[in-house]
Image (tube, grey):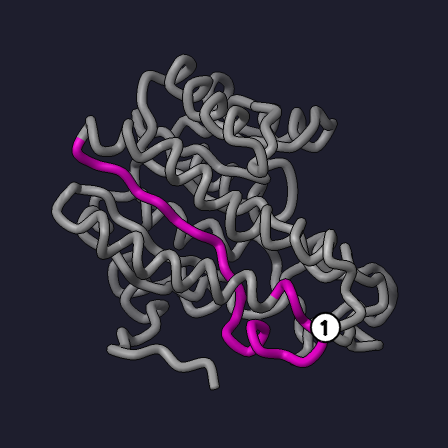
Amino acid sequence: MADLSGRVALITGGGRGLGRAMALALAQAGANVAITGTAASPELDQTVADMPAGRGLAIVADVTNDEDCARAVQSTLAAFGRIDMLVNNAGRGMRLVSETFTSDPVKFWTVPTDVWAKIMDINVDGAFRMAKAVMPQFLAQGSGRIVNISTSDQTMVRRGYAPYGPSKAALEAASRIWAQDAAGTGVCVNVLLPGGASDTDLLPGGPGRRGADGNLLPPQIMGPPIVWLLSDSAASTTGRRMIARLFDPALPPDEAAARAMTPIVDKPAIL
């Protein structure tokens, strides 16, 4: 595992699920990690408690609020003196629309307008707000990593998954643009996704709790790739899409990362 001593990551939605797994992996690798949640919670506090002493910071901040996003950045800087990585992990899924979406696909025209807007506001606009808030610091220091957490391309266009699927498609499109906008500044923008349904609160509970392919990935698979993305090896990696399921920790990290990245295409296609 890379030594990330002295580096600082800010992870939104870091109290549970994928966010918690990434926060713990980065802290174990030596990084200082600030995590956000929309409200104070035992999960947020427990995640910090599970990090090595002095490595974690819990911040109550809502990514749908500009002032909260700015405060999350400033609180991280005040605690650790710098920020090297922003992980846009905070998100809401189809459970906000229906608790039975996996067995009874949602028709898009039945989704309440306010619910559609809320999912888009968190999953797309929230990532934009956080990236906008941290970019002045990244530009001033001449370096920075933005990692946007996405989903499988099948999920983006899967029947019954609007607006969650489209929100992640929008986030990936934004990521590609941001990477081009930041070219030459020392700021890298990449996408990381589990590579299938993961064992988080995005899925309803119950005995049949599985992804569309019948599998359920552990959140911990996000650990090795997020550590690599903050390492020296990833200093010039930008505009790429990495699938955590394909990152083999048994391989040398650079080889594992190369195998986990999807090919670059000139023109992405949805239909």
Q: Residues within 10 Å of mark 1 (few under 14, many from 20)?
A: few
Give residue 202's quadrant in the image.
bottom right
Give residue 4's quadrant in the image.
top left
Front residue (pair 136, 42): 136
Q: Determine if the magenta segment contains residue 151.
A: yes
x and y percent of residue 220 in the render? 55, 52
Q: Which residue is found at the position 70% from the left and 24% from the top? A: 40
Q: Which residue is found at the position 51% from the left and 19% from the top? A: 53
- Apparent side of residue 226 relative to residue 210 in the rendered image (left or right): left
Q: Disc 1 marks which amino acid?
A: Phe
Q: Determine if the magenta segment contains residue 176.
A: no
Q: Which residue is found at the position 56% from the left and 72% from the top? A: 156
Measured along the vertical axis of the image, is residue 250 above or below residue 51? below
- Apparent side of residue 99 relative to residue 219 in the rendered image (left or right): right
Give residue 240's quadrant in the image.
bottom left
Label 1: which residue? 108
x and y percent of residue 236 in the render? 18, 51
Q: Looking at the image, how many numbered discs can be counted on the residues?
A: 1
Q: Which residues are magenta?
A: 142-164
